[in-house]
Image (spheres, rainbow, N blue to C red):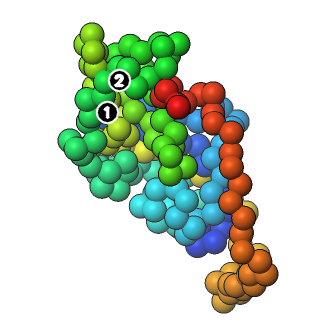
Amino acid sequence: MKVVKDGDKVNISCEAKLENGVLCFKNEEEKYIEIVVGEGKFFPIVENELKEMKEGETKKVTLEPKDAFGPYINDLVLEVPKDVFRSDVNLEVGSRVKIDAPSGKTYYGTVTKLTEEALTLDLNHPLAGKKVMITVTVVSIEENQQPSSEKKIRFPLKKTKKSQKVKSKRSTINPLKTK
Protein backbone atom coordinates (compact mmCIF):
# COMPACT_ATOMS: atom_id res chain seq x y z
CA MET A 1 0.00 0.00 0.00
CA LYS A 2 1.24 3.49 -0.87
CA VAL A 3 2.27 5.91 1.85
CA VAL A 4 2.62 9.67 1.52
CA LYS A 5 6.14 10.99 0.96
CA ASP A 6 7.60 14.44 0.33
CA GLY A 7 6.70 15.61 -3.18
CA ASP A 8 3.66 13.33 -3.57
CA LYS A 9 0.43 14.84 -4.84
CA VAL A 10 -2.39 13.90 -2.47
CA ASN A 11 -6.11 14.45 -2.41
CA ILE A 12 -7.38 15.00 1.09
CA SER A 13 -10.70 15.44 2.79
CA CYS A 14 -10.43 18.13 5.46
CA GLU A 15 -12.55 19.41 8.31
CA ALA A 16 -11.53 22.29 10.60
CA LYS A 17 -13.14 23.11 13.94
CA LEU A 18 -12.44 25.59 16.68
CA GLU A 19 -11.72 24.47 20.26
CA ASN A 20 -15.38 24.89 21.16
CA GLY A 21 -16.40 22.50 18.38
CA VAL A 22 -17.70 25.13 15.95
CA LEU A 23 -17.14 23.97 12.36
CA CYS A 24 -15.23 26.58 10.36
CA PHE A 25 -14.43 24.56 7.21
CA LYS A 26 -15.32 21.28 5.56
CA ASN A 27 -14.62 20.50 1.94
CA GLU A 28 -17.62 19.43 -0.09
CA GLU A 29 -18.02 15.71 -0.58
CA GLU A 30 -16.12 14.53 -3.67
CA LYS A 31 -14.41 17.96 -3.97
CA TYR A 32 -11.14 17.07 -2.32
CA ILE A 33 -8.23 19.38 -1.62
CA GLU A 34 -5.20 18.58 -3.78
CA ILE A 35 -1.78 19.43 -2.38
CA VAL A 36 1.83 18.54 -3.07
CA VAL A 37 3.35 17.50 0.25
CA GLY A 38 6.33 19.65 1.18
CA GLU A 39 5.46 22.67 -1.00
CA GLY A 40 4.17 24.58 2.00
CA LYS A 41 1.00 25.77 0.26
CA PHE A 42 -1.20 24.17 2.92
CA PHE A 43 -0.56 24.37 6.68
CA PRO A 44 3.06 23.11 6.92
CA ILE A 45 2.36 21.21 10.15
CA VAL A 46 -0.51 19.35 8.49
CA GLU A 47 1.63 18.64 5.41
CA ASN A 48 4.29 17.17 7.68
CA GLU A 49 1.71 15.03 9.50
CA LEU A 50 0.52 13.63 6.15
CA LYS A 51 3.90 11.96 5.58
CA GLU A 52 3.76 8.21 6.11
CA MET A 53 -0.06 8.20 6.08
CA LYS A 54 -1.80 5.61 3.89
CA GLU A 55 -4.80 6.02 1.59
CA GLY A 56 -7.95 6.04 3.69
CA GLU A 57 -6.11 6.93 6.90
CA THR A 58 -7.42 9.80 9.06
CA LYS A 59 -5.48 11.95 11.51
CA LYS A 60 -6.36 14.85 13.82
CA VAL A 61 -3.93 17.76 14.07
CA THR A 62 -4.23 20.75 16.43
CA LEU A 63 -2.86 24.03 15.13
CA GLU A 64 -1.89 26.76 17.57
CA PRO A 65 -2.78 30.30 16.40
CA LYS A 66 0.80 30.97 15.21
CA ASP A 67 0.61 27.88 12.96
CA ALA A 68 -2.92 28.57 11.69
CA PHE A 69 -4.08 32.14 11.03
CA GLY A 70 -1.65 34.04 13.24
CA PRO A 71 -2.11 35.91 16.49
CA TYR A 72 -4.86 38.44 17.01
CA ILE A 73 -3.32 41.90 16.62
CA ASN A 74 -5.16 44.73 18.37
CA ASP A 75 -3.49 47.34 16.16
CA LEU A 76 -5.43 45.94 13.20
CA VAL A 77 -8.71 47.17 14.66
CA LEU A 78 -9.37 50.65 13.30
CA GLU A 79 -12.05 53.28 13.65
CA VAL A 80 -12.87 54.63 10.19
CA PRO A 81 -15.15 57.57 9.32
CA LYS A 82 -18.23 56.42 7.43
CA ASP A 83 -17.82 59.17 4.86
CA VAL A 84 -14.77 57.45 3.32
CA PHE A 85 -17.12 54.75 2.01
CA ARG A 86 -19.35 55.12 -1.03
CA SER A 87 -22.94 55.88 -0.10
CA ASP A 88 -24.27 52.81 -1.96
CA VAL A 89 -22.28 50.40 0.25
CA ASN A 90 -24.47 48.62 2.80
CA LEU A 91 -22.48 48.63 6.04
CA GLU A 92 -23.68 46.62 9.02
CA VAL A 93 -22.06 44.79 11.94
CA GLY A 94 -20.61 41.51 10.66
CA SER A 95 -20.19 42.70 7.06
CA ARG A 96 -16.92 41.82 5.33
CA VAL A 97 -15.44 44.78 3.46
CA LYS A 98 -12.92 44.55 0.63
CA ILE A 99 -10.48 47.45 0.45
CA ASP A 100 -8.28 47.99 -2.60
CA ALA A 101 -5.28 50.02 -1.40
CA PRO A 102 -3.45 52.47 -3.71
CA SER A 103 -0.43 50.14 -3.46
CA GLY A 104 -2.39 47.50 -5.36
CA LYS A 105 -2.86 45.25 -2.34
CA THR A 106 -6.30 44.09 -1.28
CA TYR A 107 -7.34 43.93 2.35
CA TYR A 108 -10.43 42.52 3.98
CA GLY A 109 -11.99 43.65 7.21
CA THR A 110 -15.01 42.88 9.31
CA VAL A 111 -17.30 45.65 10.56
CA THR A 112 -17.52 45.13 14.33
CA LYS A 113 -19.24 48.36 15.47
CA LEU A 114 -21.26 51.18 13.88
CA THR A 115 -22.01 54.70 15.05
CA GLU A 116 -23.54 57.67 13.22
CA GLU A 117 -20.17 58.98 12.07
CA ALA A 118 -17.81 55.99 12.09
CA LEU A 119 -17.39 52.26 12.05
CA THR A 120 -14.90 49.92 13.67
CA LEU A 121 -13.13 47.70 11.15
CA ASP A 122 -11.20 44.60 12.22
CA LEU A 123 -8.52 43.70 9.65
CA ASN A 124 -7.49 40.49 11.45
CA HIS A 125 -8.39 37.18 9.80
CA PRO A 126 -11.66 35.99 11.39
CA LEU A 127 -9.78 32.98 12.85
CA ALA A 128 -6.72 34.93 14.06
CA GLY A 129 -5.74 34.07 17.62
CA LYS A 130 -7.71 30.82 17.64
CA LYS A 131 -6.64 27.18 17.87
CA VAL A 132 -7.87 25.12 14.95
CA MET A 133 -8.42 21.35 15.09
CA ILE A 134 -8.02 19.76 11.68
CA THR A 135 -9.21 16.27 10.79
CA VAL A 136 -7.58 15.17 7.56
CA THR A 137 -8.15 11.98 5.56
CA VAL A 138 -5.88 10.87 2.71
CA VAL A 139 -8.18 10.02 -0.20
CA SER A 140 -5.56 9.29 -2.86
CA ILE A 141 -1.81 9.47 -3.40
CA GLU A 142 -0.04 10.18 -6.67
CA GLU A 143 3.61 9.36 -6.10
CA ASN A 144 6.25 11.90 -7.02
CA GLN A 145 7.67 10.95 -10.39
CA GLN A 146 10.79 13.13 -10.19
CA PRO A 147 13.90 12.16 -8.28
CA SER A 148 14.32 14.53 -5.32
CA SER A 149 17.53 16.04 -6.78
CA GLU A 150 15.69 17.03 -9.98
CA LYS A 151 12.75 18.75 -8.32
CA LYS A 152 14.97 21.33 -6.64
CA ILE A 153 16.65 22.62 -9.81
CA ARG A 154 15.61 26.18 -10.61
CA PHE A 155 16.38 27.99 -13.85
CA PRO A 156 16.45 31.77 -13.54
CA LEU A 157 14.49 33.62 -16.19
CA LYS A 158 16.46 36.02 -18.31
CA LYS A 159 15.01 39.53 -18.34
CA THR A 160 14.87 40.99 -21.82
CA LYS A 161 13.09 44.30 -21.29
CA LYS A 162 12.01 46.36 -18.34
CA SER A 163 8.50 45.52 -17.31
CA GLN A 164 5.92 48.13 -18.13
CA LYS A 165 3.46 49.40 -15.58
CA VAL A 166 -0.10 48.99 -16.69
CA LYS A 167 -2.80 51.20 -15.26
CA SER A 168 -5.70 49.11 -14.11
CA LYS A 169 -9.28 50.29 -13.99
CA ARG A 170 -10.64 50.91 -10.53
CA SER A 171 -12.65 48.03 -9.17
CA THR A 172 -16.36 48.65 -8.86
CA ILE A 173 -16.25 46.39 -5.79
CA ASN A 174 -14.11 48.84 -3.81
CA PRO A 175 -16.37 50.34 -1.12
CA LEU A 176 -14.14 53.38 -0.63
CA LYS A 177 -14.87 56.69 -2.28
CA THR A 178 -12.41 57.50 -5.04
CA LYS A 179 -11.55 60.90 -6.39
In the orientation shown, which residue stands out farthest toward the top? 116
Horizontal and vertical percent position of residue 55: 63, 55
In the orientation shown, which residue stands out farthest toward the left? 74
In the orientation shown, which residue stands out farthest toward the bottom? 149
Q: Is residue 165 visible?
A: yes
The answer to whether residue 6 is left or right of residue 163 is left
Residue drawn at x 30%, y 28% is 80
Horizontal and vertical percent position of residue 174: 55, 30
Residue drawn at x 31%, y 24% is 81
Residue type at mark 1 is Asp
Q: Which residue is mark 2?
A: 111
Q: Is residue 147 visible?
A: no
Earlier in the chain: of badge 2 and badge 1, it is 2
Q: Nearer the viewer, residue 147 or 55?
A: 147
Residue drawn at x 28%, y 20% is 118
Q: Which residue is mark 1?
A: 122
Q: Which quadrant is home to the N terminus?
A: bottom right
In the orientation shown, which residue stands out farthest toward the front? 179
Q: Are marks 2 and 1 in contact (CB under 8 Å)?
A: yes
Residue drawn at x 59%, y 43% is 13
Q: Nearer the viewer, residue 162 or 159?
A: 162
In this rendering, the answer to whether 65 lies above or below 146 is above
Q: Nearer the viewer, residue 96 or 117?
A: 117
The answer to whether residue 9 is left or right of residue 101 is right
**At numbered mark 2, what does the secondary structure look like: helix, strand or loop?**
strand
In this rendering, the answer to whether 5 lies above or below 27 is below
Q: How many marks?
A: 2
Residue type at mark 2 is Val
Q: CA distance from mark 2 to mark 1?
A: 6 Å
- Classify residue 53 by image quadrant: bottom right
**At numbered mark 1, what does the secondary structure look like: helix, strand or loop?**
strand
